[in-house]
Amino acid sequence: MTGSSFRDTFLPRCMAIAIGSLPQSEVEPTLNLIADCLPEAPFWPQLPNRSFLESMYVQYAQGLPGVVLDEVNERFYIDPGQADFADQLTCFYEAVMAADLDHFAIGRERASGLWEGLPALAERFSEKTPILVKGQVTGPVSFGLGVTDAKKKSIIYDPTLADVVVKHLNLKARWQEAFLKSCFPGLPTLTFFDEPYMVSFGTAFCTLSREQVQNLLNEVSAGLQGLTGVHCCGNTDWSLLLGTRVDLLNFDAYEYGENLLLYQAELEKFLAAGGYLAWGVVPTSAAIDNEDVDSLFALLAGQMERLSSATISLKSILERSFVSPSCGAGSLTPARAVRVFELTKKLSERLRKHYKL
């Protein structure tokens, strides 16, 4: 976990936060939604429907040695067989050694919600300062499994490329953190590493060891000044993620909350060490049509109460918790995405009122 003094004193008390993606193709409507529904923790919106360049892997791929990008056919892979690959590696590691954050900037054409959206969002908060500002980066496990080489083999299994990926994403995150701070001066940051592929851990699709995964997550989150979190929107070995150095675990509490509660001892240790939980209890699926604040409150309150024990009080759990959608909203219709965000805000307010937080 980070040594940040902010973490030592900060209690979110069921603060509303969100994952990165939204279905809108224009920046402006997303900013209004974020400002209205996330008054304490705004974030920059990822807009994958706007461009192939804004999809979750391509968005962070700029500057990778050996990268091949075919925008016409929307194909992206890594080719270590390029004639100048060794020179690209040399350039890459020189930038890593120099901690040259500008070398790892996320291009304007790949993140309109960051470059256009975040400064405009900051203006909306000029008279109501939030508590923190959130960013996000695709995590190294998902990036390494989801991105392949020219032979369609996941690059995470190539030792050279695996090392490149984790260092690349770490410096992307550190550059992004600096960008967040430039738009919201003096505000603490929270950076999520999105790991949807962690659902594959322990299967034939992901043969990485527990130690390898934890090392990747610890390295990718190292050196950031603000809070760090890992987001997994499916079921996985939660003890693995709870055993990393990230400050926050974000999980799909709507579908998999009961699975997480099986890890009582690990959860208690994580929270006692200063960790946070972000309960993704607002579904980012068609199920959102059948839920309201009352139903989601009942579900989440029940899970939190079952986690409480003689070792860790319900009050402590509530104070160290965030409320979020279960995943990014990018696959939803714009109307459903709006409902997800509105319910997330209302649920946060309901929890705080009911438990007097």
Image: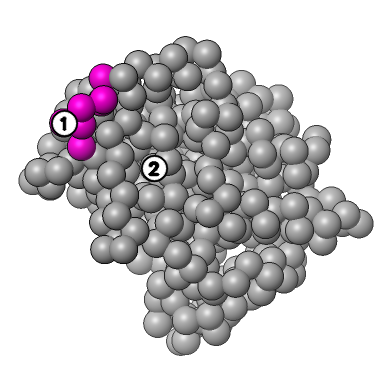
First reached walking from the N terminus: tag 2 or tag 1:
2
Rendered residue at 49%/68% (across/down): 50
Instruction: Give the color scheme: rainbow, by chain, secondary structure or one colour.
Output: one colour
Q: Image quadrant of residue 35? A: bottom right
Can you name the residue that lies furthest to the right here?
127
Q: Is residue 87 depicted above or below 291 in this figure?
A: above
Secondary structure at numbered mark 2: loop
Q: Which residues, given as a range, are shown in magenta?
A: 79-86
Residue that label 1 marks:
81
Rendered residue at 46%/30% (across/down): 170
Numbered label attached to residue 6: none
Q: Crowding at label 2, few (<14), some or many (≥20) Cα neighbours within 10 Å?
A: many
Q: Where is residue 52 in the image (x, y as percent from the top left)?
A: 39, 62
Q: Position of residue 310 (x, y in %)?
A: 51, 41
Q: What residue type is labelled 2?
A: Ala
Residue that label 2 marks:
61
Q: Is residue 144 depicted above or below 95 in this figure?
A: below
- Between the C-alphas of marks 2 and 1, the distance is 18 Å
Q: Where is residue 62 in the image (x, y as percent from the top left)?
A: 42, 41
Rendered residue at 30%/39% (across/down): 67
